[in-house]
Every structure is written in structure tokens, then in C-alpha cells.
Amino acid sequence: MLARCLSASLHGLEAKPVTVEVDLAPGLPGIQLVGLADKAIQESRERVRSALRNSGFRGPLVRVVINLAPADRRKEGPAFDLPIALGLLVASGQLDRPKLDGLWCAGELGLDGSLHPCRGVIAFADLARQKGARALIVSPGNAPEAALIPNLTIWTANNLKELVQQLKGECPVVRVEHNPSPQPAIPAAMTLKPLGLGIEGIDRAAHALALAAAGGHHLLMVGPPGCGKTHLARQLPLLLPPLTTSESLTITRIHSVAGEFDTSEPLLHQRPFRCAHHSCSGAALLGGGHTPKPGEISLAHGGVLFLDELAEFPRRVLDLLRQPLEDGNVRLSRSRETTVFPAAVTLVAATNPCPCGWHGDSDQVCRCTSAQRQRYWQRLSGPLLDRIDLQLRLERRSSRQMRSYLEATPSPQTHSPWLEPSRVKAARVRMRTRNPRGCSNRFLTTADLRRYGQFKADGLTLWERVIEQRRLTTRSSLQLLRVARTIADLNGQETVQAEAIADASGYRCTDLMGDHSAGAVSR
């Protein structure tokens, strides 16, 4: 007897329909799985056998062939446990075939028949809605995630026996209603935290942070150990504008496909902040694997990717970031298919000026030779640095500055006017109103800069001199104009004057590193 059950498999961020076909035929008892199933699906034979037996159902005592159609597409993961079990029950006559008409299902089975969550259910739910499914059956842990998709009926059960009773009408069906999961209200006092010891009152650092938040510009911070680079980077997501519903669904889908879904928060409302360790591989940073999964840069989509100790990363790994930083997506090509993951991030990187970290410091003596400093900075390729709009040198705080901070009266607000969220929001509104497609200034093309930049003649004259003196590349020259446009937007100015160009040129510290060390720059 032949039975069919509808399910899906993940391919990137999308789900592709899969029909689970179960056929029982005379022969020696056994289960044969065909249809390019991975190891996790092959092992489902033992999980399904135990789940059926421990749930009070008969196991197959004949030859069973299970096909995952289409057979030329690879499938992976334990989400096919539930459709295989339901198909076996229909094929063996323990469940009527019409009960599965129009139903989609996905879930992992425990040996006792309990239903466990699986990754990527929000993509399954979106596909089921598009295909006009009567309902989608998932585990209780996946139900809140699936309920984020509107116009789709969600059924759930704690175990296989309870689900079969629902399908037979022996107990009421457990439905989960659509939950739009509105964004919770965040008190204004929690919007931005004080920057803390060693950073409070540094107007230049606050200005760079505001520029990165307003214009979406990538930021590189160079400074000695303990000057506040990491703490400064962690404040950037708090300055970014709130997520829209569309952005929240995309970010939630990425985390669900990666297996990092939090059942306590079905829809992610906060912009992600991902901190990749310098020992991570290229596949961990960009994504990959036999069946590609999102990497750190995709998990940071819509938020901040922080690379601390940038010069400690392998150069070949850092160079993989060139295309994603420019295009806003990651394209992973394999022999059978090409997968595209979104990767529109704001990159924040931090590094020391030299291996010991003290080159250029007024008090501490650097122990590195010129050759060591040069080798240290040669780990960062020129094309990668060329893609970072803001390059800032930070200095260590003196003991007098730290004492004045400790003796000052605590305040819930930051001291720098640049870190006012309202100021960043106003600049974003100007960009959205003026720029084509409502994009931020970082994504302005050369034609957009010519048409919407509104640069004054004296500003362009200064810009031309800066290019000639520093021998900037075409990409760096245009980035300087984009940063200047963001500076003008933060200041509430319609036109870009020479002062904005001069200020923007101060954020190109690596252009002045004649000996490949940050000590050549003084602020």
C-alpha cells in the first residue's frame, strides 16, 4: 500500500517541497530510504521504529521503501521523522489516508514518540502558506515560530500518539493562532547605556560611532589595550534604528535556519551583535558546509559584526569579506547549487597598533621592531582596509582622566551630544527622504552622489587636494564623500561644505601609515 505525506527541506533561507512516499511490499522486514537522504535522515529509521512501538502502534513487519521526492535534490536533518511515521501509519492501515490530505508536517521524533523542534520551521511555514496547505503540524517548541506566518493554520501535539488521536477525531485538535509578536516597548533610559570608563567624554570616538550608526559606515578602531574599543563597539546596536517587521522576520528566519532560534522570543526585535573570534574559519565567518548554513556575517544581518583583534585573523579569512561587505550578501557556490545568504552588516573592527600594543603611546614603550610592526599590519590587505569607511585612532586614558570620571556624579545619559539617538534618527530620516530607494549613505553610487550629494565647490576642491596628497583609490575617494554627506546629515545641513570634507578626511588614519603602523598618526 502506498502513502504520501507532504514536508519540506531547507536550501539556504528557502524551503523546497518534498513528498514523503511510503510503500509496503512483501519481503524481508526492513526499511530502505532513497532520495538523497543524509545521515540524520538515514538514522530516522531507528527513531521511527522505536517511536511507533513506544506509542502503541505496530511497527512494519514487511519490506518498506521510503522515497523523498524529488529524488535529485539533497535532503538533510531530522525534520522528516514525523512525515515518515505518519506515512507508515497510513500505509499500514492504522490511519486513514484522507486524514493527511492537504497537511504539511515537520518534526523530530524521540524514541518515546515525543515531538522535538527542528530548525528552519519558519521557512517551512512560509512555503506551506504559499502552497495553500490545510494546516502545518509542528512540535510545541516550533509552534510560536510557525505562528509568525499569517494566513496559515498551525497544529501541534506533544507526542505521536496524541497527534494520531487528533487526526482521528478522538480528541480536539490543538491549534496555534497567528501571533504577529508586536515589538515590546523599551524605556527611553534603556535605549543607550553610558559608554563608561576610558571612553566617556571622548568626542571623536562618539562622533565616529554616530556616523557608523547613521550612515551604515564600517568602522575600524586602532588603539592600545584597554582603551575602550570593545565597549565602544557594543554600544553601536543601541544607536541603530528599531527593526521593521520585515527585517525582524528576515533576521528570525536566518537564526532559525542556523539552528539558533530562541523559543522564548519567537520574533527577534533587537538588532544582532555578533562577535567572531579570531580563530574562526572562513566557513564559520561566511557560512558553508556540505549543505551551506549561515555564518557569522549572515547571523549579524541588519546589525553589527564585531571583529576584535582584527590583525590576529588569518589574512585569507579576512579577504573573504571583501565581496560581502560591498554587495551585502554572501554567495556560496557548490557543485550542485548556489546559495545566497543576506549579509547587510555594519562591520566594526578593532586592533592594536603593533604586536605588543603600545606603539605610539606617550607613556608606554613599544617593544616591537619596525619589521615586526610592518609584518603585523601586512596581515590586513589594502583592498580590505579600502572598504572600511571610518578608521579611528584611540588613545589610552590618563590616570587623571580616570579619576575625574570616578569622582563625577553618575548619570544615566551619555555626555556626548553625538550619541543622542534622536540625532541619529533625524539623520536617517533625511537620508530616507533624499536618497534613492531610501538607502543609507554608505550605499550611494557615484551617480547618486552626483545627483543627491549637494557638494559645495570649496568642499570638492579640498576633496581633490586630499586625494592627491594621500593618493587615495577611487573607492576610498568616494567613501570620503559618503562620510562627508553623513556628517552633514548629522549636523542638519542640506549641503556638504569644506568643513565636512575636512572632518571626513580625519577618519582615514591608515592612509597616513607610512611605516604600516598606527603610531604615525596623532590625534
Image (spheres, grey):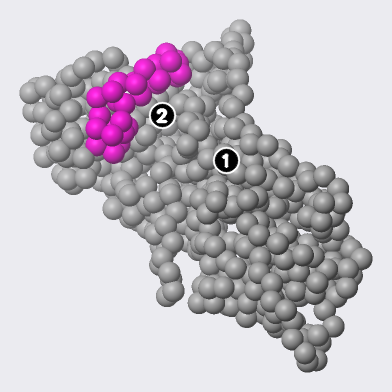
Quarter of the image with the N terminus is bottom right
> Do residues under tags 2 and 1 come within 8 Å of each other at their CB atoms?
no
Looking at the image, which residue sits at the far top?
409
The stretch drawn in magenta includes residue 429: yes
Question: Label 1: few (<14), some or many (≥20) within 10 Å?
Answer: some
Residue 331 is situated, as x and y percent measured from the top left of the image, at 39, 59
Helix, strand or loop at mark 2: helix
Q: Residue 151 carries which label?
A: 1
- Magenta span of residues: 416-444
The residue identified by callout 2 is 213
Amino acid carrying label 1: it is Asn
Q: Which of marks 2 and 1 is nearer the N terminus?
A: 1
When the figure is inspected, residue 132 is found, relative to residue 100, above or below; the finding is above
**Position of residue 189 in the picture relative to residue 380 (left or right):** right
Residue 470 visible in rendering: no
Amino acid carrying label 2: it is Ala
The stretch drawn in magenta includes residue 38: no
Residue placed at 24% from the left, 37% from the top?
444
Question: Label 2: few (<14), some or many (≥20) within 10 Å?
Answer: many
Q: Nearer the viewer, residue 156 or 309?
A: 156
Residue 465 is situated, as x and y percent measured from the top left of the image, at 10, 33
When the figure is inspected, residue 186 is found, relative to residue 153, above or below; the finding is above
Residue placed at 37% from the left, 39% from the top?
218
Q: Which of marks 2 and 1 is in front?
A: 1
Q: Which of 479 and 382 is in front in this view?
A: 479
**Position of residue 111 in the picture relative to residue 404 (left or right):** right
